[in-house]
Image (tube, helix red, strand yellow):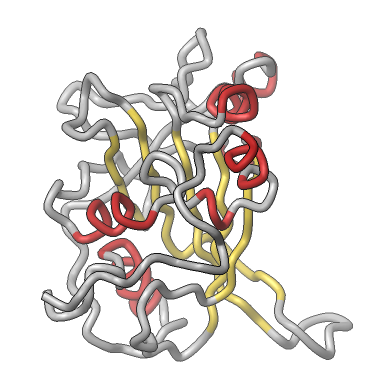
Amino acid sequence: MSSSRCITFCARIVLSFAAALGCVASGEAPSPPAAALAADAAAAGATAAGGAAADGAAADGAAARYTADGRLTFPTGYREWVFLTSGLDMNYSSMPMEMGGSLFDNVFVSPRAYAEFVRTAHWPDGTVLVKESRQASTRGSINRHGKFQRGDAVVVEVHVHDSARFPGGWAFFIFGKQDPAVRVAEGADCYECHRRNGAVETTFVQFYPTLLPLANAHGEALGALDAPRAASPPR
């Protein structure tokens, strides 16, 4: 790939899905791999909500569910999980992304994982983080300034922690529909970018304003939000 490792594979997949839907200008985004993603969900401490939150959610509240051939099922109830942050047109490279419109990202985490992070500043096995991307609009209703989110999610990405299942303990899954997803190949840029730049255990806690202070208090965060580590050199 010609771009730097910090122009994450996942970000380019988002652009390719978005371009297909007409909200992003066509560019050099590669075609998505056999992709899809996810997790389902039943929240810890929220049995009733969990039962309705995800198709096929395990009775014990496990967030990640897999098909017999190892694909991840879509987390249909992830919006009932714990909200962590939103971003607008975020890009981890000094090179601008060619976009014909803006995208919001919203990040959610499975409730049991959130509770454990609050307690220890570590992500337990079974953690599932979901990032959805939605179109940003400026005109609508009474809005005259700024941007708001509109429409269905363009693409959904999932980051799963499972030390027994995945080399390195973490895996990415991406999908634009709700079909079960295969794992993003281990050599994809997103893994290296997260290993190099993740504030806590390959995750971007530096962008989660309610969790970063907890990580700092436990001495777990690997760098200040306003002092990012050097970007990876181009390949």
Q: How many marks?
A: 0
Which of the image's four quarters has the C terminus?
Answer: bottom left
Give coordinates of residue 177: x percent, y percent. Answer: 37, 53
Which image quarter: residue 124?
top left
In the image, 191: left or right of 42?
A: left
* Front position in the image: 93 or 1: 93
Q: Can I make out residue 12 in this image?
A: no
* Front position in the image: 130 or 181: 130
Which image quarter: residue 196?
bottom left
Q: Which residue occupies the extreme top position in the image? A: 60
Q: Which residue occupies the extreme right position in the image? A: 142
- Judge whether 218 appears above or below 49 on screen: below
Look at 67% across and 52% down and name the residue there.
209
Which of the image's four quarters has the N terminus?
Answer: bottom left
Q: Can I make out residue 224 in this image?
A: yes
* Front position in the image: 191 or 180: 191
Look at 36% across and 24% down and name the residue there.
65
- Judge whether 47 appears above or below 136 on screen: above
Look at 51% across and 9% down and name the residue there.
59
Give coordinates of residue 151: x percent, y percent. Answer: 60, 67
Look at 45% across and 42% down and name the residue there.
200
Which image quarter: residue 44?
top right
Give coordinates of residue 60: x percent, y percent. Answer: 51, 8
In the image, 104: left or right of 46?
A: left
In the image, 27: left or right of 49?
A: left
